[in-house]
């Protein structure tokens, strides 16, 4: 089965990508020598649909396993929810050899990862991502976080999982809109690192949108390979890892200004990618035809390409300046130079940013 190794200084972990692997979680944990007491953290819907298979597999492999649930949605990524989980782990007498399993989308992954990073100063955790966004992005790379009332992901830790189990069969139950939002991140990988992936996404759109398992395995695998390569080169985002933020500067601002409710993260990233490509074209860094190719692909996946008209360019600019990725108030963008390559740390004149945000 496709397995990708993420090798970092002093440790490495595998990402297993296949159909049905969720129900082999226990055996996979045996293979990689992970502990015997397990707390599975999930949300109610995912716990009900996929929890029994995971718990049965863990117990069949001789593990003591309990299920802990958190409320659905981004609202669960709070310090309060983390504290409640610490108390549950303590009640279960989880020790340093115990393991947290994050079963769900990026919300559960970020929260459970953060709890694993901090409980007893850090215990092992396994990511079992069940959304496409989590399989291609959130579950890989070790960024864990909770939100504060003033902003997303403001409290967190780098804590790499010990194992990632991506079962593409779980994507069959994913609402189509969530699947497409995850595809925005796959398109991102094409633009930043792999022109062939970008072309494939255009050619195989029908199979992708029909959630054909073999096609999804390939896409998840290629996406994880790219993310793993970047994380291996720059675990703590001191340089190269910033390429993963392509489309995210404008995307985050649009998400924040729409209250994290009208647009999914991937949809905001789709808008941000088109905006960044337009900036690059205006600066003469990217052929105008490539902006068209990107926009066409994004539209093929029924993702948005335009900043919502209710958002004033000035408000987006201001929000971007508050983003934690801003350096000394200077707006920095990741801009494409062709399909398959980007440059990080591009300073873009405010007039250009404004013009693009106004739809130009
Ligand atoms: N740590 C990172 O590197 C990283 C990267 C990107 C995003 N994130 C974070 O990820 C979060 C978004 O993740 P997400 O898009 O997975 O959202 P999510 O976790 O909220 O999941 C989306 C919805 O899908 C449901 N769901 C999950 N699996 C399902 C399945 N198999 N079938 C049907 N429904 C299912 C969930 O219950 C939820 O309602 C954000 O909090 C973001 O900050 C983290």
Image (cartoon, rainbow, N blue to C red):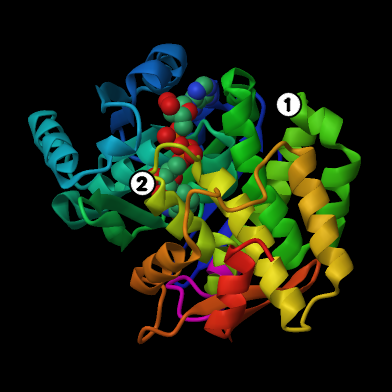
- Locate residue 83: give its quadrant: top left
Q: Which mark is residue 327?
A: none
Q: Quadrant of the N terminus?
A: top right
| x and y, in percent, of residue 188 in the image | 67, 57
| x and y, in percent, of residue 267 in the image | 58, 44
Q: What stretch of residues is rendered in magenta?
A: 230-240
Which element carries disc 1, helix, strand or loop? loop
User: Dot 1, crowdedness within 10 Å: few (<14), some or many (≥20)?
Assistant: many
Q: Quadrant of the C terminus?
A: bottom right
| x and y, in percent, of residue 211 in the image | 73, 26
Q: Please tell me which residue lies in front, 282 or 218.
A: 282
Ligand 1 closer than 8 Å to the CB at disc 2?
A: yes
Q: Which residue is mark 1?
A: 211
> Mark 2 or 1 closer to N-term?
2
* CA–CA distance in space, label 2 to label 1: 25 Å
| x and y, in percent, of residue 147 in the image | 26, 51
Q: Which residue is mark 2?
A: 110
Which residue appears at 27% of the width and 60% of the height? 154
Q: Is residue 181 magenta?
A: no
User: Dot 2, crowdedness within 10 Å: few (<14), some or many (≥20)?
Assistant: many
* Residue 298 appears in the rendering: yes
Which residue appears at 75% of the width and 58% of the height? 190
């Amino acid at each position: 089965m496709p397995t990708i190794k993420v090798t970092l200084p002093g440790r490495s972990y595998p990402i297993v990508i296949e159909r049905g692997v969720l129900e082999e979680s226990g055996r996979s944990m045996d293979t990689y020598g992970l502990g015997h007491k397990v707390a599975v953290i999930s949300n109610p819907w995912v716990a009900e649909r996929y929890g029994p298979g995971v718990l049965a597999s863990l117990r069949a492999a001789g593990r003591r396993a309990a299920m802990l649930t958190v409320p659905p949605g981004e609202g669960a990524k709070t310090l309060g929810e983390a504290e409640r989980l610490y108390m549950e782990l303590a009640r279960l007498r989880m020790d340093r050899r115990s393991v947290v399993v994050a079963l769900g989308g990026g919300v559960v992954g970020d929260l459970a990862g953060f709890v694993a990073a901090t409980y007893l100063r850090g215990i092992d955790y396994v990511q079992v991502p069940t959304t496409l966004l989590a399989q291609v992005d959130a579950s890989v790379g070790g960024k864990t976080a909770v939100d504060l009332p003033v902003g997303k992901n403001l409290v967190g830790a780098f804590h790499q999982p010990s194992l990632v189990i991506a079962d593409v069969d779980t994507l069959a139950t994913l609402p189509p809109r969530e699947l497409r939002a995850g595809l925005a991140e796959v398109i991102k990988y094409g633009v930043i690192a792999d022109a062939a992936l970008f072309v494939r996404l255009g050619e195989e759109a029908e199979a992708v949108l029909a959630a054909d398992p073999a096609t999804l395995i390939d896409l998840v695998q290629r996406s994880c390979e790219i993310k793993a390569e970047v994380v291996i080169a720059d675990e703590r985002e001191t340089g190269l890892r910033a390429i993963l933020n392509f489309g995210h500067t404008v995307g985050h601002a649009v998400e924040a200004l729409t209250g994290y409710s009208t647009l999914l993260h991937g949809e905001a990233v789709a808008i941000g990618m088109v905006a960044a490509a337009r900036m690059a074209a205006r600066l003469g860094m990217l052929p105008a035809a490539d902006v068209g190719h990107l926009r066409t692909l994004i539209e093929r996946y029924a993702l948005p390409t335009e900043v919502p008209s209710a958002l004033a360019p000035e408000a987006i600019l201001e929000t971007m300046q508050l983003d934690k990725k801003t350096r000394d108030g200077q707006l920095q963008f990741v801009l494409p130079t062709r399909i398959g390559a980007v440059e990080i740390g591009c300073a873009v004149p405010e007039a250009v940013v404004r013009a693009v945000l106004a739809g130009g």
